Amino acid sequence: MAEQTQEMDVHNRSFEAVLRAEPALAAVDCAVRALVAMATPERRVCSECLWYRVIKPLASPWIGWERGCIPPNAEEPGQALRVLNGAELLAEPESTPAQTETELWLRSSQAFDLVTDEWLRIAETRSAICAMCSE
């Protein structure tokens, strides 16, 4: 991730600056905007469903506290249950160190909130009855 990250002006921490600093977030932005734009009176998407099913899973690896974390290798389905010891349960996730001020800021809750609040604002403008949760 750090290789793709472009340096950003530390005083220009805007939505657009974050998208320029982390190109992967531009794809998430396109997905969120497309889903909201495709909403019709018959098929709405509520901001809660958009948050839990689209925004959070797609954005978390690229911005906020989970940025830089190395995901554990998934075990093959069907393997026998394994007993974990206390050290394994309490182990901190491994992560790559932040090399720049931009990378450090992209891992902050402020950066996460800046980007995700914008997406939720967009979603709320078209939200009503949701096709995903039928509310």
Image (spheres, rainbow, N blue to C red):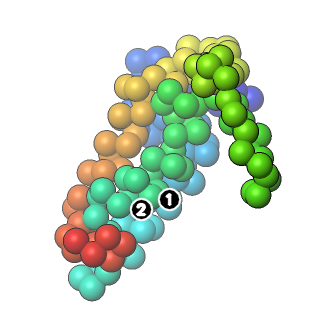
Q: Could you tell whether 35 is left or right of 5 in the image?
A: left
When the figure is inspected, residue 90 is found, relative to residue 76, above or below; the finding is above
| In the foreground, 12 or 55 | 55
When the figure is inspected, residue 122 is found, relative to residue 63, above or below; the finding is below
Residue 33: mark? 2
User: Circle 1 sits in a helix, a strand or a loop, which is it?
Assistant: helix
Residue type highlighted by circle 2: Arg
Residue 15: mark? none
- In the rendered image, the quadrant that contains the N terminus is top right
- In the rendered image, the quadrant that contains the C terminus is bottom left
- Label 1, label 2: how many angstroms apart (C-alpha)? 5 Å
User: Circle 2 sits in a helix, a strand or a loop, which is it?
Assistant: helix
Dot 1 alpha-carbon crowd within 10 angstroms: few under 14, some 14 to 19, many 20 or more: few
Q: Which residue is mark 1?
A: 30
Q: Residue at x 37, y 53 (%)?
A: 51
Q: Could you tell whether 76 is left or right of 24 in the image?
A: right
Q: Residue at x 51, y 44 (%)?
A: 59
Dot 2 alpha-carbon crowd within 10 angstroms: few under 14, some 14 to 19, many 20 or more: some
When the figure is inspected, residue 112 is found, relative to residue 101, above or below; the finding is below
Q: Could you tell whether 79 is left or right of 87 in the image?
A: right
Q: Is residue 6 visible?
A: no
Asked if labels 2 and 1 touch by Cβ distance under 8 angstroms, the answer is: yes
The image quarter in which residue 15 lies: top left
Q: Residue at x 62, y 19 (%)?
A: 86
Residue type highlighted by circle 1: Cys
